[in-house]
Image: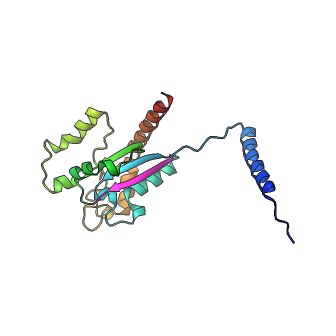
Amino acid sequence: MRKVPSKATLANMGVVFLLCNWLIAALAGGTIARAEPPLRIVVLGDSLVAGLGLKPSDAFPAQLERALKARGHVVEVINAGVSGDTTAGGLARLAWAVPEQTDAVILELGANDALRGLDPAGAIESIYPDLANKYALILYPFFLQGVAMDPKLNLDDGLHPNARGVAEITKNILPAVEQLIERARTKHATATKG
């Protein structure tokens, strides 16, 4: 009959395990780092973000999170996309769609405003560049860069990217998102020092 270890023995095994990890790290010349909390990125947008016609795992936020993690970033990317949303709709749900613990936001809105003929109250081509300049934001000028009008990368409606199209968008936008992550990390580091 096998003897069951006592709670004290199990507790000591846990201490030995922790000490072994510390010892291995020390012998390797390293230190044990605390787990870095994930940087929370909310993607606020319309059907292009929501993933209209796609599995949730193929939508832009999910593909972006996988791509960033593959590059070593500790992130959580939240899908706050609503199909058919306009800029006014995004603004109306901002308070609950972007929680306080958010570190960065990617905003993808405006296409439905144009499709519905809503007055942008100014030249539509300059709205986003003007806002980016005024508030020192990172601007990625065209979300569908390299994907728009390519039948191989879009659903049958010709407007929404398929999974391969979203992968192309993700690849193209990745440098701008990494720049956003760097800004968010710098801001967070500055806030914790002060």
Tell which of 11 and 137 is nearer to you.
Answer: 11
State the image coordinates of residue 35 (x, y, percent, origin top left).
58, 44
Nearest the viewer among 96 and 60 is 96
The reply, left or right, for residue 36 in relation to residue 91 is right
Q: Is residue 80 magenta?
A: yes
Residue 64 is one of the magenta-drawn residues: no
Q: Residue drawn at (38%, 42%), measured in percent from left and top? A: 176
Task: Name the chief secondary structure element in magenta.
Answer: strand
Question: In screen coordinates, is 33 left or right of 132?
Answer: right
Q: Residue at x 13, y 43 (%)?
A: 121
x, y percent for residue 160: 28, 61
The stretch of residues the image draws in magenta is 74-82
Position of residue 24 in the picture relative to residue 136 (left or right): right
Q: Nearer the viewer, residue 94 or 178?
A: 94
User: How far across and down, in percent of the image, does residue 101 sit?
Assistant: 42, 44
- Most distant residue in the bottom direction: 1
Closer to the camera, 123 or 189? 189
Q: Residue furthest top?
A: 194
Task: Give the colour scheme of this rendering.
Answer: rainbow
Q: Position of residue 48 (x, y in %)?
A: 30, 57
Q: Residue at x 33, y 61 (%)?
A: 153
Would residue 81 be found to the left or right of residue 31 on screen? left
Residue 110 appears in view: no
The tally of labels here is 0
* Image height of 186 relative to 40, above or below: above
Relative to residue 187, is residue 120 depicted above or below?
below
Image position of 94 with respect to 157: above or below: above
Residue at coordinates 18% horizontally, 53% vertically from top-left? Answer: 113
Q: From the image, which quarter does the N terminus lie in?
A: bottom right
Can you name the residue that lies furthest to the front here? Answer: 7
Any part of residue 31 in sight: yes
